[in-house]
Amino acid sequence: MLPLRSVPSERAPGVPEPEELWEAEMERLRCSGVPVRGLPYAMMDKRLIWQLREPAGVQTLRWQRWQRRRQTVERRLREAAQRLARGLGLWEAALYEIGGLFGTGIRSYFTFLRFLLLLNLLSLLLTASFVLLPLAWLRPPDPGPALNLTLQCPGSCQSQPGVLRFHNQLWHVLTGRAFTNTYLFYGAYRVGPESSSVYSIRLAYLLSPLACLLLCFCGTLRRMVKGLPQKTLLGQGYQAPLSAKVFSSWDFCIRVQEAAIIKKHEISNEFKVELEEGRRFQLMQQQTRAQRACHLLSYLRVNILIGLLVVGAISAIFWATKYSQDNKEESLFLLLQYLPPGVIALVNFLGPLLFTFLVQLENYPPNTEVNLTLMWCVVLKLASLGMFSFSLGQTILCIGRDKTSCESYGYNACDYQCWENSVGEELYKLSIFNFLLTVAFAFLVTLPRRLLVDQFSGRFWAWLEREEFLVPKNVLDIVAGQTITWMGLFYCPLLPLLNSVFLFLTFYIKKYTLLKNSRASSRPFRASSSTFFFQLVLLLGLLLAAVPLGYVVSSIHSSWDCGLFTNYSAPWQVVPELVALGLPPIGQRALHYLGSHAFSFPLLIMLSLVLTVCISQTQANARAIHRLRKQLVWQVQEKWHLVEDLSRLLPEPGPSDSPGPKSPASQASCPRSFCPGFPCPGSPGARAPPPGPSVVDAAGLRSTCPGPHGTPASARRFRFPSVAEL
């Protein structure tokens, strides 16, 4: 703390009195807008400054005191709520253990799984609050009997005897037919006309999925921007020095042996990530133009081959879905119901293996091999779901097909009287199959493999070893499940509840697999990069789910004999009807203008201006960062010049001063780096090494202290050790 009291001393002529300095300083502090809390003075002096800043009016003083007390209470309550949320957070202890033992990259997968669980619970809360509770509380009038439509269909396609012959309740639960008449599916929601109800269940049912998708998009985008890698913004040259992490990473408050072990693993994993990234950056810088050209041609060849495999895989999914829907009355219908999910699972299992094999034939670097395989795995996973959705639309909604029932009713009414329930059942089966596949793979593949590897010894078992816990593969699996949930928000409103249960169980299954049956990935992941990749894939899945839903809501005719929108040409038609019933003519004209093309041009101009401002601000921030980095380099250079001048002015130690403890002057002759690591930005370049041995510090760097004859030592070229050397 800096004392404000002046100390009497001898003054030169013309120097102000201490009392004058004291008064000037007090006046400056009174008029300053710097908060008292941030001033570097003692508490007694802060109270004096606070009293000087108080106004003269008593009423104003009381009001300001009350404002400050309120702000202080709010800040303390906010901090207490944050501490309570961290203490009661879901899986905090498990996440801490996983992050310490296996690194922040693997921990980010489990954190992402928790984030998806919160998104599903939020979607379930919206649906229950705006649809289920009003439906149970208001008890809307009975809509009356369903319409008795006489369908002109070729043959007897209305009955499904293949389904009615089987009464296995377990199989009905797995296929969703046991919940057809419940609120799990669209067909069970029935209300009367809009004019006879106070609260519009139809509008709430229509807007709930759209609100869920919007909230999930905002939450994902916020998390994605928050987890942006800093090196992408600041550049590869701007990195934290390793020596700073060596001497400042340990937590000296640790008193438990288990916590100390976890902290050691965490620090070791951080060093592995840093060194691996530095080594990859050096390898990229050492490539010549000819090598880059050869790699580019190799990339094109491999990408073409993998692209052909992806086209074949999605074609197989299309034909499997079409065959399953066209043969609903066969005796093997029960087995055909899970044909599309089985083909999708087979494609997503064999695809990455083939991709990895083709990439390994080219002898790519490990980083390039993983990134290329991961990119095509994302394409295959999302394309398979997109093709499954398109094949359902072509079979049920006759997209691109000509059928008599489609011309009359807008969908294949002969085979699917309630087509929303049929789509919901398909997505329900796909979600169930994905979870069962996760359980089966964990306990029927990974667990026996670990038991066999631990039980037997030999060259084959050493080669087989435990399964590697691949973070990208597991992320793609849960992203696929979340995409299926988003696709079924309109057809199966309670699907988020089912997916929440699956995610909750998946966390413990994956935790058991990681701790007991698997080994950590050989390629370390940085948490920020992993989080950015997770959110990017999740946004692609959200877009894949939102496009078909928007098309169905706005353009496809609803079923005639089930659901909320039986009398509407499209579900969105309920919005104009409610606007006409509930808003005055002025409000109707305003909404009509907002939905017209005349409003799109001002909106486009406004968005262009906002985008221009954002781009300009981003460029200004980049220039500011560049100037600050230059200023940092100049400051470090200035410090180095001062250190060199100081080392020349200080006397050098003589031969007689070598034994015994050194004096402060001799210790000061060996200047220390002002940067916690090496090389520093703006530090002197390499110099000629001295003939004698050099001193190496803890980070493996040659010391820059002058030698015994005043000759400064040079910095040895830093080599990033590999992960195996750690």
Image (tube, rainbow, N blue to C red):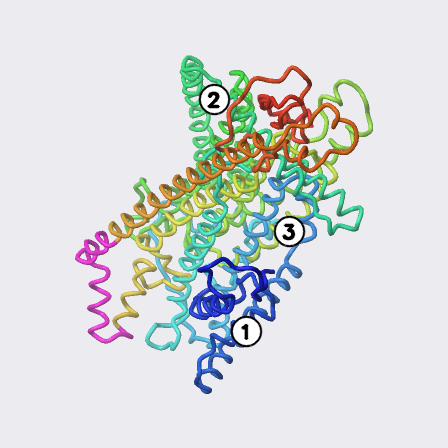
Inspect the image, locate mark 2, and give the three-letter code of the amino acid beneath it.
Gln
Secondary structure beneath dot 2 equals helix
Name the mark nearer the viewer: 2 or 3.
2
Inspect the image, locate mark 1, and give the three-letter code of the amino acid beneath it.
Leu
State the image quarter where residue 270 is shown.
Answer: top right
**Mark 1 packing: few (<14 Cα in 10 Å), some, or many (20+)?**
few
Pick the front one: 618 or 419: 618
Q: Is residue 393 above or below residue 61?
A: above
What label sits on residue 285 in the rendered view? 2
Instruction: Tell which circle, 2 or 3, labels the residue nearer the N-terminal end.
Output: 3
**Residue corresponding to mark 3:** 170
Secondary structure beneath dot 1 equals helix
- Segment colored magenta: 581-606
Tell me, yes or no, whether the highlighted magenta stretch contains residue 23: no
Instruction: Tell which circle, 1 or 3, labels the residue nearer the N-terminal end.
Output: 1
Give the CA separation, mark 2 to mark 3.
60 Å
